[in-house]
Image (cartoon, rainbow, N blue to C red):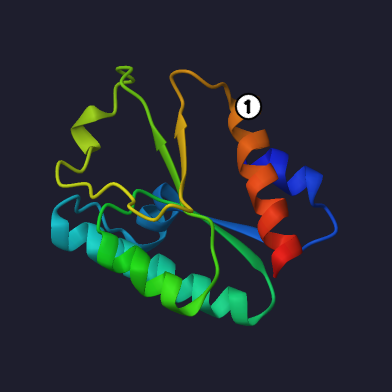
Amino acid sequence: IIKKIKKKESSKKIINIDGDDLRHISSNQDYSKEGRIKNISTAIAIARFLANKKYTVIISIVAPYRFLRDELKEQFTFLEVYLHTREIRGREDYFAKDYEIPIDEKALFLDTGKLNIEECSNEIFNVYRKMATLA
C-alpha cells in the first residue's frame, strides 16, 4: 500500500515508519503493553521530527492504545486507518488483545479480508487526497 501511495505522490517527501523496522532498530521485541507503548512512543517521536522537516509521514504500526493515537492527533492532522480481518494469517500470537478500535468518525476502516491491496491503497489515497486539499 505504501509503495502505491508513494508512486502516486512522487513529488512529495513521503516516508514510512514501519513497526517491524522499528523493532529491529531498537531491538524491542517486547509485545507486552509496556513494550508496545515504548515502540509506539518511539514512532511518534520520529514522526514529530520528520513532520517538522516537512515530510509526509506514514506510520505503519499496530497502535492499540487510543491515548497514544489521540496524543498525536492533538499535534498533527492525520488519517487513522484501521486495517482488520477475520482471516487467519499466522501472526495471531502478536495480536494486541486489548486493542482499542478507533472511535473517531474520520478514521478509515478497511477489511483486508474483503479488499485487496489495490483497493485498500485506493481508499487510503482518496481520503488522503481529500485531506490534503482541505489543509
Q: Nearer the viewer, residue 2 or 24?
A: 2
- The image shows residue 14 at horizontal and vertical percentages of 69, 60
- Secondary structure under tag 1 reads helix
**Left or right of 31 on screen, residue 17:** right
Is residue 54 among what the camera can see?
Answer: yes
**Quadrant of residue 91 within the rendered picture:** top left
- The image shows residue 77 at horizontal and vertical percentages of 55, 69
Give above or below for 66 relative to 46.
above
Q: Residues within 10 Å of mark 1 (few under 14, many from 20)?
A: some
**Left or right of 41 on screen, residue 49:** right
- The image shows residue 2 at horizontal and vertical percentages of 62, 43
Disc 1 target residue: 119
**Quadrant of residue 122 within the rendered picture:** top right
Q: Name the amino acid type tagged 1.
A: Glu
In the image, farthest residue toward the front: 105
**Left or right of 57 on screen, residue 23:** left
State the residue at coordinates (42%, 72%): 72
Q: Nearer the viewer, residue 11 or 74?
A: 74
Q: Nearer the viewer, residue 12 or 124?
A: 124
In the image, farthest residue toward the right: 11
State the residue at coordinates (22%, 47%): 99
